Image (cartoon, grey):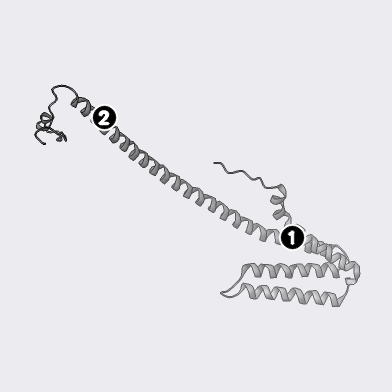
Amino acid sequence: MNEPIVARHWLAHAAPKVAPLVATSTVLILGRIWNANGAEHSTGNAALMVVLAAGAATAGAFASAGRSSNGVLAGTAFATSGSLALAGVAGYADGWSLPILLWAVATAVAYGIAARHWRTDRRDAIAYQRGTAHQGAEHAHTERVEALRAGAQIESARAGAAYAEQLATALITRATLPGFNPYALTDAGLPELPVHTEHDQ
């Protein structure tokens, strides 16, 4: 029975591709909103963002070091550090040149990291599909061999049953004919027939 083909919506395909752009653009917009609400040239706000960004970067360094390194946690920490740095610059700067430059750099880096994960996911998906197809082919071959073997056994049993039935029918028919002598068959080397005669009684 064929499985139904489920077509993914185009948004499901496009969402991962635009996620880095949406993330960096959101940080830039929030930083500029913060700039318009008093963060421009605010040393205290800039210092706060520097401390937060440095703390996130330090956490990412610790998460990626050692034997018990966690790539997901390290990546999240570094992404948070970059976002805080971008937001701090966008909030502190008085123009758009530096925030736009940092936004472009952050977007390019985000797409570079995402592309690496996309390649890994695609490679894993292809390997899984190939393994599944190989296992399916092996199972299908085994099922075909077993089906042929079972069919041969059934046909052999049917042929044996038909032969036994035909032999029994022929012997019964021959026994009803006049002048039939079952001992002649025994003398000819055929199996002895269970015939009851007056001598046996």
Q: Foreground residue, 33 or 97?
A: 33
50 to the left or right of 124? right
Label annotation for residue 166: 2
Of residue 152 and residue 171, the one placed in the foreground of this image is: 171
Q: Quadrant of the C terminus?
A: top left
In the picture provided, is 135 more to the left or to the right than 67? left
How many other residues sit within 10 Å of disc 1, few (<14), some (14-19) or many (≥20)? Answer: some
Q: First in sequence: mark 2 or mark 1?
A: 1
- Percent from the top left, x then y, of residue 8? 67, 47
Where does the image place residue 161, in percent across and percent down from the top left?
29, 35
Label 2 CA crowd tier, 10 Å (few <14, some 14–19, many 20+): few
- Taking 181 as reference, is 116 above or below it? below
Q: Residue furthest top?
A: 178
Residue 130 place in picture, x, y as percent: 52, 50
**Residue linked to disc 1:** 107
Amino acid on which disc 1 is placed: Thr
Image: 186 above or below 56:
above
Compare residues 190 and 31 and report the one nearer the observer.
190
* In front: label 2 or label 1: 2
Q: Which residue is rendered at x = 28% and y = 35% of the image?
A: 160
Residue 63, percent across and down?
A: 64, 73
Image-quadrant location for residue 65: bottom right
Q: Quadrant of the N terminus?
A: top right
